[in-house]
Amino acid sequence: MITAGTVKESIINRRQLSTVAAQLGLEVVGIVPPAYPSAGNLFDHWIAEGKHGEMAFLERYRDVRLDPRKILPGCRSVVVFCMSYQHSSFRTVDSLSEPQVAAYARFQDYHKVLRRKVETVFQSLSCSHDDYRVTVDSAPVLERALAAQGQSGFIGKNTLWISPEFGSQVLLAEAFTTLDLTFDDKTPVPVDRKTEQGGCGPCRQCQTACPTGALDEAYRLDARKCLAYWTIENRGPIPLEFWPHLSKYYFGCDICQTACPYNIKPKRRLEPPQDLEPRLNWDLFTVATMDDNAYRDMFGGTPMTRAKRSGLRRNALIAMAVTGHPRLQEAIVFAERDGGTPLDETVAQIKQRKSAGG
Ligand code: B12
Ligand code: SF4
Ligand code: SF4
């Protein structure tokens, strides 16, 4: 008997999905089963060691996180998509004088844009909402573990999903679907060799470039040492030991990606879609002193709201302190006037650092 499902399945294959996705500026990076061969154990071990720091959300919904079938009743396949944020104008960022924002955050919020695009792919292939569920970092899913099972990439020592063709500066999204699609036929990428299908081989560029030792153990990031964790996820003060490393990025960190040969010389450059709007780059003083209205105007609808206004002000104050910004004193006055966590602690740290000769 031919059902609506089987008709769709016969139409929807990788080529079809890729063609529609490409029109929207997306790449299909995998059509994979809703299961992880080994990631569950790796994840449990990572949490048990406390490498997630204070990110308590990663401890929740363990049963769903380790069993992707639970994301959608009747799920039989997962299609993993990616969208680039390697804007050509951003290549020189490391040579700029002021600390910057990580490249992915210099656009409008990718969550909404990616979701809308993946929804459009499925709708244009006549799928109904009952057939699929789209996630973009919006459900307990190990996105990179799913992506790595597809034919287009692998997980590097910096823990990022990397395409041997266009590198790692992409964001991932998944469509969990009840459709029985043909999975990618993939031989696992050997971790000890560099091959046409990817792999790090003996390279350690990301590990040596990471300024804090967060990647000392290859393939396992210690978030408690990662600048992206401290500047995006952490709500309290940032320990002084990390301050000297905040002179390049004051929100997120791209150091282990910009060091990676797969990003330095990609075989194919993947530009972000035209409708992924770039946002203005604000100077540190403006960020360190912004009030609520200014915050909404400057950062509303961007990924930077993850750190909240107080986190962004904290980060900018620290970046001003470590780079010897001429308006630091003025910014401190604003911070003292407004007060609250983590500004109070940050101002106290600036004073402590100054009295210790920093
Ligand atoms: C929490 C989180 C963070 C944390 C922790 C990062 C980390 N490495 O775990 C912090 C705040 C530090 C962070 C930083 C960044 N993040 Co983040 N983050 C996440 C989030 C929400 C969960 C990741 C998670 O579950 N971590 C737990 C660890 C244990 O899981 P994992 O890294 O996915 O690793 C599993 C697989 O590697 C698997 N595995 C499967 N196969 C294989 C094979 C081998 C050989 C090995 C060793 C392992 C392995 O084992 C692991 C355990 O299950 C994801 C979105 C999501 N829901 O997945 C985004 C996500 C990983 N982040 C993303 C980005 C862009 C970043 C930053 C680049 C942002 C920035 N510029 O500052 C940095 C990169 C830092 C880095 N080197 O990873 C992208 C990555 C895209 C990509 N190309 O990989 C994601 C996927 C968001 C998205 N939707 O695109 N992030
Ligand atoms: S994001 Fe920065 S701090 Fe974190 S692992 Fe990469 S290089 Fe290290
Ligand atoms: S820098 Fe080298 S070791 Fe690190 S992810 Fe890239 S290829 Fe792998």
Image (cartoon, rainbow, N blue to C red):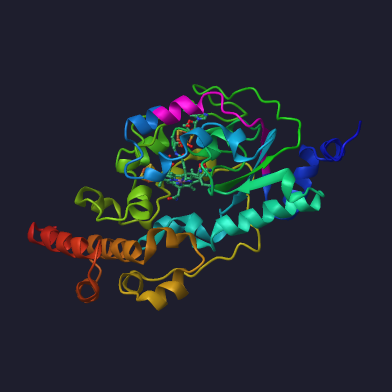
Q: Residue at x 62, y 29 (%)?
A: 197
Task: Indicate the quadrant containing the C terminus: top left, top right, bottom left or bottom right.
Answer: bottom left
**Residue at far front of view:** 73
| Image spot of residue 87 (x, y percent) | 56, 57
Is residue 274 shown above or below 286? Answer: above
**Residue 352 sits in quarter:** bottom left
Magenta span has 33? Answer: yes
Q: Is residue 98 visible?
A: no
| Image spot of residue 169 (x, y percent) | 54, 47
Q: Is residue 254 visible?
A: yes
Is residue 22 shown above or below 156? Answer: below
Say which of 247 and 299 sits in front. Answer: 299
**Residue at far left of view:** 355
Q: Residue at x 41, y 70 (%)?
A: 282
**Residue 206 sits in quarter:** top left
Q: Which residues are magenta?
A: 28-44
Magenta span has 164? Answer: no
